[in-house]
Amino acid sequence: MATSASTVAAAVVARARREIREHFERNDAFSVERAVAYDPPDRVHRLQFEALVGRAILRPTGNGTYWFDRDAERAVEERQRAAGILILKIALIVFAIGIAAAVIMPRLR
């Protein structure tokens, strides 16, 4: 079975995020006082690092170190989960409307 390029890309991104989080976990860098430096080893890690900083999951201290905000990570995950549930609900409503239309339309002819 062939693996699609998008599946491989998603796996590479997920691995980079996991490795970044593990770096901060190993150093117990979950507060300003425990902040550590991070030097992304490649482009994927750098892009994911920047994304985590942009989402305020990784917080800069101002002196080249960062700390991992677990509360911010949970909030982002909850927003993503809520968005996924909303999309699923909308898809189910559209599907139900499509079925209803398919059942009703032939009877109207």
Image (cartoon, rainbow, N blue to C red):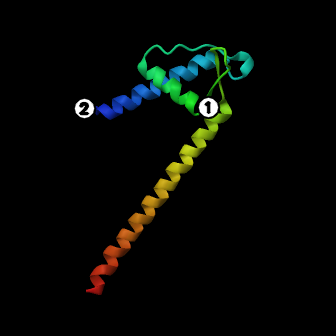
Q: Earlier in the sequence, mark 2 or mark 1?
A: 2
- Could you say which is closer to the camera, residue 39 or residue 71? 39
Residue 77: give x, y in percent of width and height. Answer: 58, 40
Residue 24 position by quadrant: top right
Q: Residues within 10 Å of mark 1 (few under 14, many from 20)?
A: some
Residue 69, above or below 103: above
Judging from the image, what secondary structure is the residue with disc 1 in? loop
Identify which amino acid the numbered label 2 is placed on.
Ala
Q: Going by the image, does 51 lie left or right of 97?
A: right
Q: Residue furthest right?
A: 33
**64 vs 98: above or below:** above
Q: CA distance from mark 2 to mark 1?
A: 37 Å
Picture residue at 36% right of the left edge, 70% below the top: 99
Picture disc at residue 72:
none
User: Count the marks: how many?
Assistant: 2
Residue beneath disc 1: 56
Q: Nearer the viewer, mark 2 or mark 1?
A: 1
Kindly identify the residue that appears in the image at 40 percent across and 25 percent down.
Answer: 12
The picture places residue 35, in percent across and down from the top left corner, at 68, 17
The residue beneath circle 2 is 2
Q: Quadrant of the C terminus?
A: bottom left
Callout 1, which amino acid? Ala
> Which residue does the image show at 33% across and 77% down from the upper left?
103
Residue 45: x %, y % from top left: 47, 21
Q: Are marks 2 and 1 in contact (CB under 8 Å)?
A: no
> Measured along the vertical axis of the image, is residue 106 above or below residue 77?
below
Residue at horizontal 34%, vertical 29%?
8
Question: Could you say whether the residue bearing mark 2 is in a helix, strand or loop?
Answer: loop
For the N terminus, which image quadrant? top left
Where's residue 42, x and y in %? 43, 16
